[in-house]
Image: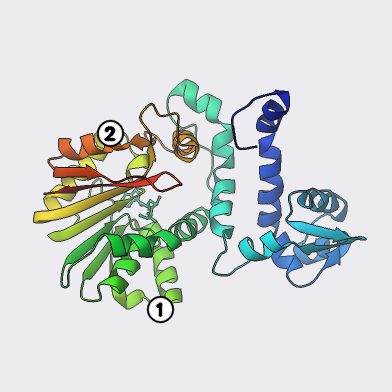
Amino acid sequence: MTGPVRNVDDLMATGHGYQRSMVLLAALKLGVFRALAAGACDAPALAKRIGADSGKLSVLLDALAPLGLVAKSGRRYRNAAAAREFLLPGKNSMESILLHHLDGWSDWGRLPATIRAGSAAKGGVEGSYQENFIRGMEENARERAAVVARRIRVRPGERVLDLGGGPGTYAVAWAEASPDARVTLFDTPGTLRVTRKILREKGASHRVSLVEGDFLVDPLGGPYDFVWISQILHAYSEADCVRILRKVRSALAVGGRAAVQEFVLAEGKTSPPGPVFFAVHMVAVTEGGRAYTAREIAGMMKASGFRRVVSGSPDPRGVGIVRGVR
Ligand SMILES: C[S@@+](CC[C@H](N)C(=O)[O-])C[C@H]1O[C@@H](n2cnc3c(N)ncnc32)[C@H](O)[C@@H]1O
């Protein structure tokens, strides 16, 4: 059920949609799909493999069948095609980003309290949080990064900053598209611990220089010819976004370019659905963040001193880019 509510069945499907979500996320967290990749088996055998209660696990496994994630024949379960493609390690894996959604589950459970109080009612964070988050960003960006790096050209020798570059998907894409560019990725120490692992796994550590810091308080270095600010602003209030963008502008050479990439809300803020629900996610998990319209992003860039500010059309997921020049 992804469209609007038109009848009582749609209403109820929306109301208990979290049940389908948790069946998938619980199975993933328990390692069901990886364990089934070792061979089809019944619930007691699988319970032994993953360390779970066999009776309860069998109920969960049965619920994965109507989701199309496992197939059951007799008492034995095996991974269905969608699970084999997206829920196991591999080039199309979505494991980390889904586990990141599970990490946000308790924040969503506190959404009424957060909205009443006006700030995120925080719970504890799991040790695997940052790893799931940053690897999840790689899964989200891996197809788009090469397209963006071809569309936004970086000239030979230019100095590029990937601000809050996370997994380095975009930084590596620019380094590959323009081998002479000097690419720097700035992020927090906690994120860079994961970034280093990802770059090593890709054999790309030599392509990107890493700088540790908090971009709200630490110098960004520079001067740079191009600064890429992807999926950063939505975690911050408008006042903080302007602060960040002013800092970016000061770190650019005169004539240097900046590009902001975000899940962009249409005017009116009730579409497209992806960015609309993402905005609620930001309310649940951050202090001052939300999603912005292209006009709001352009307005913040102009307020930070950028000129020649232009917005591109968002892609089908609602991801759009706003560019400006110092
Ligand atoms: C949603 S991820 C986006 C990652 C990457 N830019 C992309 O589009 O795939 C946000 C990134 O910004 C980093 N970040 C957020 N606040 C930061 C801050 N104050 N200083 C440095 N990095 C920050 C996070 O650590 C994370 O890597």
- Colouring method of the image: rainbow
How many C-alpha atoms fall within 10 Å of the one at disc 1: few (<14), some, or many (≥20)?
A: few
Q: Is residue 293 found left or right of 88 in the rendered image?
A: left
- From the viewer's side, name the closer residue of 192 and 83: 83
Query: Does dot 2 land on a helix, a strand or a loop?
Result: helix
Q: Which residue is mark 1?
A: 203
Badge 1 amino acid: Gly
- Residue 42, quarter of the rendered image: bottom right
Q: Is residue 180 found left or right of 90 in the rendered image?
A: left
Label count reads 2
Residue 223 point in image, percent of width and height: 12, 60
How many C-alpha atoms fall within 10 Å of the one at disc 2: few (<14), some, or many (≥20)?
A: some
- Residue 118, quarter of the rendered image: top left
Q: Which residue is mark 2?
A: 296
Of circles 1 and 2, the one toward us is 2
Query: Does dot 1 land on a helix, a strand or a loop?
Result: loop
For residue 221, say whether it is visible: no
Q: Is residue 325 found left or right of 2 in the rendered image?
A: left
For residue 111, say whether it is visible: yes
